[in-house]
């Protein structure tokens, strides 16, 4: 019978019935015979060790419970929807078919998507109505509209999230950069189309 030495892992031929008597021919280590352990019946778990199903990931997702206030809801509480009077919000295409294009956001609510949207994204991975961008003065909120491939802010999939200047918004394979700057700021760049 072939066995492997427990010490040097060399495989050698051990005659039947000689387990524990003959050592490895290379390092002379003697493998002790393996004794089968008697099977013990499994004891039932005490009640306090059972899973609390309210604390597992199988419960509702964060933000999906209707009576739960999200960070976005707290941030926009008391604000009126609409663009800021002294700031200009814009999206610049960083990756995608219209790379370099800058879109000034002039409405309080702008829908982004492949079709049926205020801002058309020519990307086969974008849903028809992918997400909506809401302006609350100097604050911008993105809400995913149950898109097939999800909406990302800075490479994190979101259902809703706050956009800050410099954040990257990804819809399919198209990546935008959000900017909110003073209307008198010359570094904002030339205006593209309005949405």
Image (spheres, helix red, strand yellow):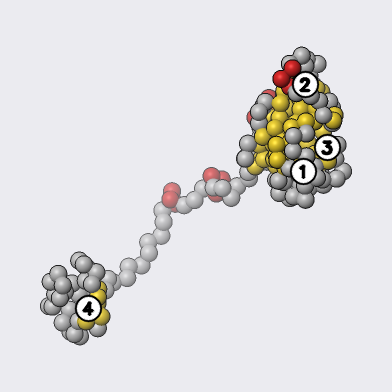
Q: Residue furthest bottom?
A: 16
User: Above or below — where is 118 with respect to 122?
Assistant: above
> Seen in the image, is 28 located left or right of residue 193?
left
Say whether marks 2 and 4 touch (CB < 8 Å): no
Inter-mark Cα distance, 3 to 1 = 14 Å
SS for callout 2: strand
SS for callout 3: strand
Percent coordinates x, y for residue 86 in the rendering = 78, 15
Inter-mark Cα distance, 2 to 1 = 24 Å
Please state, as top left, top right, bottom left or bottom right, where the C terminus lies in the image.
top right
Disc 4 target residue = 12
Disc 1 target residue = 97
Say whether marks 3 and 1 touch (CB < 8 Å): no
Residue ID at (71%, 49%): 149
Residue ID at (82%, 29%): 192
Percent coordinates x, y for residue 14 in the rendering = 20, 81
Inter-mark Cα distance, 1 to 4 = 66 Å
Say whether marks 3 and 4 touch (CB < 8 Å): no
Disc 2 target residue = 88
N-terminal of the pair, mark 2 or mark 3, is 2
Name which quarter of the figure residue 142 lies in.
top right
Residue toward you, 191 or 125: 191
Disc 3 target residue = 119
Residue toward you, 50 or 65: 65
Residue toward you, 41 or 188: 188
Name which quarter of the figure residue 24 lies in.
bottom left
Look at discs 3 and 1 and give the one toward the viewer.
Answer: 1
Please state, as top left, top right, bottom left or bottom right, where the N terminus lies in the image.
bottom left
N-terminal of the pair, mark 1 or mark 4, is 4
Is residue 106 visible in the rendered image? The answer is yes
Look at discs 2 and 1 and give the one toward the viewer.
Answer: 1
N-terminal of the pair, mark 3 or mark 1, is 1
């Amino acid at each position: 019978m072939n066995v492997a030495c427990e010490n040097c892992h060399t495989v050698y031929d051990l005659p039947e019935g000689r387990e524990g008597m003959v050592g490895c021919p290379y390092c002379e280590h003697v493998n002790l015979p393996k004794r089968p352990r008697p099977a013990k019946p499994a004891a039932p778990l005490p009640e306090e060790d059972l899973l609390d199903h309210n604390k597992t990931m199988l419960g509702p997702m964060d933000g999906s419970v209707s009576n739960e206030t999200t960070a976005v809801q707290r941030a926009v509480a008391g604000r009126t929807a609409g663009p800021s009077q002294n700031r200009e919000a814009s999206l610049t295409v960083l990756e995608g078919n219209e790379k370099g294009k800058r879109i000034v956001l002039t409405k309080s609510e702008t829908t982004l998507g492949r079709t049926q949207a205020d801002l058309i994204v020519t990307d086969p991975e974008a849903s028809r109505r992918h997400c909506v961008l809401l302006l609350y003065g100097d604050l911008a909120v993105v809400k995913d509209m149950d898109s097939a491939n999800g909406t990302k802010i800075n490479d994190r999939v979101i259902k809703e999230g706050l956009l800050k200047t410099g954040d990257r918004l990804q819809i399919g394979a198209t990546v935008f950069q959000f900017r909110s700057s003073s209307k008198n700021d010359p570094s904002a760049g030339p205006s593209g189309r309005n949405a």
